[in-house]
Image: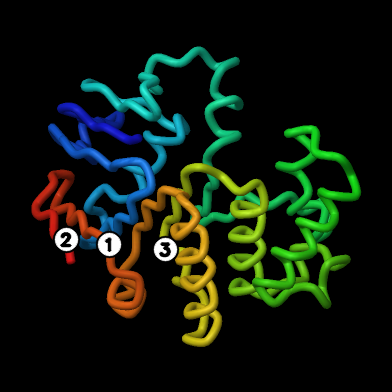
Amino acid sequence: MINFSQVTKRYPGGHEALSGVNFTVEQGELVFLTGHSGAGKSTLLKLIAAIERPTSGVVSVSGQNVGRLPRRAIPYLRRNIGLVFQDHKLLFDRNVIENVLLPLDIAGLERREALKRARAVIDKVGLLAREKANPVSLSGGEQQRLCIARALVGRPALLLADEPTGNLDAGYAADIMSMFRDFHQVGTTLLIATHDDRAITALGGRMLRLDHGRVAETTSW
C-alpha cells in the first residue's frame, strides 16, 4: 500500500529531514514508527498524505506517486486516509460533532447515517456529553480525542497517526489503542508514530525506527 523508494526531503536552509529512505507497508499491516525527536517521523507521515512533497525519490500510496499528484487530485487521495497530527487541525468555528461530520459531509453520506456514525465514534473517544461544545473549550487531551474521532469516522483504508496518545492519560490511551486494534482487525492499514512503548507492546505489529532521517532498524514480532 505504501512504498518509499530512495526518498529524501530537504528543507530550505539545507536541513535534510529524510535521506534515502526505503521501506514498504503492505495493505492491512500495522507499523509503528519510532525514533528520537527530530528523526523525521512527522515529515515521513506528511509525505504520505501529500501535505509535503519529497525533494527526490518516489512516495507511492496504493500505486499512485503522491509526490507528482496535481493539487486537484490530493483531496481524493485523502478521502481514504485518516490523519491524526499533533497540531490537530480542528475547525474552531464548528462544534465537536460538526468537526467529526466534516469528512462524511464531503463524502456525501446520507445525513441520518452520518449522524449515527459520528455519534458512535464520539462516544467511543469519551466526548459524547460534549458533542455541542466548541473545540476551544476542550482540554488538549480532549482535542486529541476529537482529532482521532474525525480521522476514524470515515472508516479509512489507511490511518496515519503522529503521537496519537501523547496528550492522553493511561486510561484514554488504552481506549484509543483498542480502537486502533479494532480497525486493524477489519483491514485498515495503520502507520503510527509513537514513543509509547505500552502501545507497541499491546498491539504488536512491526516497528520501523528512524535515526537522523534514515531507516535504522525494522523489527517484527
Residue at mark 3 to residue at mark 2: CA–CA distance = 20 Å
52 w.r.t. 195: above or below: above
Residue density around tag 1, few if under 14, some if 14–19, many if 20 or more, within 10 Å: some
Residue density around tag 3, few if under 14, some if 14–19, many if 20 or more, within 10 Å: many
21 w.r.t. 116: above or below: above
Dot 3 amino acid type: Glu
Dot 2 amino acid type: Ser
Residue at mark 2 to residue at mark 1: CA–CA distance = 6 Å
Q: Give residue 220's mark.
A: 2
Report which residue position mark 3 lands on. Answer: 163
Toward the viewer: 144 or 219? 219
Labels 3 and 1 touching (C-beta < 8 A): no
Toward the viewer: 188 or 177? 188
> Residue 60 location in percent, x, y?
33, 26
Q: Give residue 205's mark.
A: 1
Labels 2 and 1 touching (C-beta < 8 A): yes
Q: Which comes before the other along the chain, label 3 or label 2?
A: 3
Q: What residue is rendered at 40% in x and 28% in y?
A: 62
Q: Secondary structure at mark 3?
A: loop
Q: Quadrant of the N terminus?
A: top left
Q: Secondary structure at mark 2?
A: strand
